[in-house]
Amino acid sequence: MSETPVWFMIATFIVLAIFFAVDLVLIGKRPHIPSTKECVQHIAFFVVMALVFGGLVWAVSGAKPALEFYSGWLTEYSLSVDNLFVFVIIMANFAVPKEIQKYVLSVGITLALILRGIFILAGAAILERFTWVFFLFGAFLIYTAIKLAIGQDDDDEYKENVLIASMRKVVRMVDYYDGEKLRTTVDGVKYFTPMLVLFVAIGTTDVMFAFDSIPAIFGLTHDPFIVFTSNVFALLGLQQLYFLLGALLDKLVYLPIGLSVVLAFIGIKLVLEALHSNSLPFINGGHPIESVPEIPTWMSLAVIIVSLGVASIASILKMRALDKK
């Protein structure tokens, strides 16, 4: 259950709906390549709003939910940046014109929000009834962390899945884009544009990233309201971040390592929580293991900030060293 008052949650949902309407509908409606100044201003605004929101949560609900929000937001934001690696590859793979990339990102981010919302509701319901799922979530995050650390995250190459390959065979489609249109007419006959397959590619990618992000955030907080708002604030301004960092994403060489540390830490935290509330009969006779240490929220936030901060600084220093050569 959430520790946040209902009136505050309602007000938050209204404000976030307005933010998304402005970010994705009004701004995203005008096809253009945003300038660096526009991107920086947009991103800065939503970062400040996330910091302000965390402060409001602190004032309304106390320090613990606020620290959980900051921890969740930083983790989800970092995973969203990692998501951008794949978006860049998909856009290049499908030869998407730069003028309509903003629109495509708007659709992709909207799909991500919807899918994460569904996953959050499902995850909250499952975890409330079956606490042993923490063992699965924890093991999955540790496995993902190891893959990131040894460089097996498949970010360097985009491969079409079976669904997209099948669509190409059965759907009547032209090989060029017609602006933002999903369908176009050639000699009186309706054809789909590559936009259809592109949306499916981004949508299925969003599903895969939801498998990473939702267990990660539930490892930091069990409050569905904090889980949802952390994800929403992480997605706001993401399309501007795409254009701002698009040329630099491949230079953030140590970001995967920083993320792997964060995910491994959260995975271990989930396993410890599962042991602390254990009900599996083959572990300690089905009784909780009270001696297992509990990791405080402030420690989670500290580990996330240090890991991502060191990874970012190390990437910048390496980038500068390479530029001097």
Image (cartoon, helix red, strand yellow):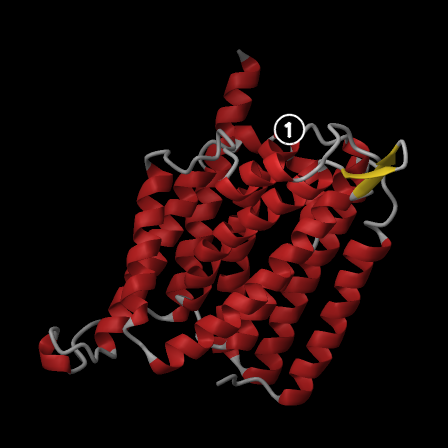
Which residue position holds label 1? 92
Q: Nearer the viewer, residue 52 or 241?
A: 241
Horizontal arrangement in the rendering, residue 277 relative to residue 233 (left or right): left
When the figure is inspected, residue 248 is found, relative to residue 51, above or below; the finding is above
Q: Residue at x 71, y 57 (%)?
A: 46
> 160 or 150, which lies in front?
160
Q: Give the image quarter of residue 81.
A: top right
Q: Quadrant of residue 323?
A: top right
Badge count: 1
x and y percentages locating residue 189 in the rendered image: 85, 37
Picture residue at 86% right of the left edge, 55% below the top: 26
Q: Secondary structure at mark 1?
A: helix
Say which residue appears at 19% left-offset and 72% top-offset: 292
Residue 282 drawn above or below residue 240: below
212 sits to left or right of 188? left
Evaluate whether residue 247 shows in this view.
no
Residue 50 or 243: which is nearer the viewer? Answer: 243
